Amino acid sequence: MSVSSPVLSPADASATNERTLVRAVLAMGLGGFSIGTGEFVIMGLLPEVARDMGVSIPQAGHLISAYALGVVVGAPVLAVLAAHWGRRALLMALMAVYALGNFASALAPGFGSLTALRLVSGLPHGTYFGVAALVAAALARPHQRARAVGWVMLGLTSATLVGVPIAATLGEHFGWRAAFAFVGAIAVAAVVMVHRWVPAMPATRGASPLRELGALARKQVWFTLGVGAIGFGGMFSVFSYIKPTLIEVAGMPQAVVPLALSLFGLGMVAGNLVGSRMADKALMPTVGKLLAWSIVVMVLFVPAAHHPLAAAMATFALGTLVAIGPALQIRLMDVAGDAQTLAAALNHSAFNAANALGAWLGGLAIAAGLGWTSTAWVGALLGLGGLGMFAWALASERRARG
């Protein structure tokens, strides 16, 4: 006598798949929340770290650079080395490394060891988001891939609104080490959640380090990375110097600045949600439109920066520029062929390159005596550069198709 297994109706199967996707996204988003909190909280705790470690605030700023370097290096290296790993196991391992890096940072005895540990903490960043994006896209319906990736990225963007203020408050009351311990605790919780709610997914058949490296031979992969590294740099050119701009140019009271910065976080959340929906409807047109939108935001920022209310609204608009993230992530998946893991991870290397490029060029403009708002003109030029790279990519693709 045999007992037949229950047969799910299409509606039941759809509900089951939707539930699996939601649970997986929540688990992976918690990891993103931990990473976003750990990445950004140090910026508000530099004075405390500098005082405790006996270094200047500019020297303490090297901790930010060390983390970014870890992201840029770790994304391709870990993606290649772990190409044959199952995706759930890889997500758990990456988040475990992130937890250990932050717990160790909380115990660092000196500035040199803390700098090295911030670099180590940054290593899993890009690969984690790349693999999480692959998992989310695989679980989603074909026309909702970008939306699923956007939901994962909500963990990162919401960290600027919730995680960073909580960690900063802990750091101010119990010392900066408590902030890193808090980040490590969230990462441990994410490991547990990923284990429970992300379905086991094997690596793609035949995955190997050599095959992953094949992504680097594809022109469209490089074009897409170039669009992100150049076109996204404008946001960082302005945001890196937003606090003195709001105070010195807009005349905003220092006590109000945190409120204005929270608008940046709200803009990131809104941009992430809207941009991912746009990308699901028309991927490449969305990339072009969002690059054009970045130029508009930069140009309007210059006059808006002279009035407190307008400057606050412009800060919100600046946050919306992250809308391009899910679109570029999906584009990399589409053009990477079999080298999905490396291509997806490299997206975050490109964004950190944009961070470094935008902040550096914006700083050069200020140092040249062009004023705080000159960072927006730098951002507009970077947006034009990204748009040019995008047009070059389209032309190259058309030629390749004959």
Image (tube, grey):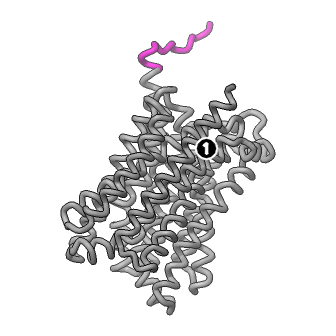
| Element assignment for label 1 | helix
Q: Nearer the viewer, residue 263 or 19?
A: 263
Query: In x, y percent, where is residue 191?
Result: 54, 53
Position of 20 compared to 118: left or right?
left
Placement of 190 over or under 143, stated as above or below: below
Most extreme residue toward the top is 1
Q: Nearer the viewer, residue 313 or 51?
A: 313
Q: Is residue 56 visible?
A: yes
Query: In x, y percent, where is residue 376?
Result: 38, 63
Placement of 392 over or under 111, stated as above or below: above
Instruction: Give the amino acid type for the residue marked by disc 1 in the picture.
Output: Arg
Position of 161 compared to 330: left or right?
left
Placement of 15 over or under 104, stated as above or below: above
Q: Nearer the viewer, residue 393 or 8?
A: 393
Report the quarter where the N terminus lies: top right
Q: Main secondary structure of the magenta part?
A: loop
Query: In x, y percent, where is residue 380?
Result: 42, 57
Residues in magenta?
A: 1-13
Q: Residue at x 52, y 50 (%)?
A: 386
The residue that disc 1 covers is 88
Q: Residue at x 59, y 72 (%)?
A: 66
Q: Is residue 92 visible?
A: no
Query: In x, y percent, where is residue 161?
Result: 33, 59
Position of 351 compared to 147: left or right?
right
Q: Is residue 7 magenta?
A: yes
> In which image quadrant can residue 43 be found?
bottom left
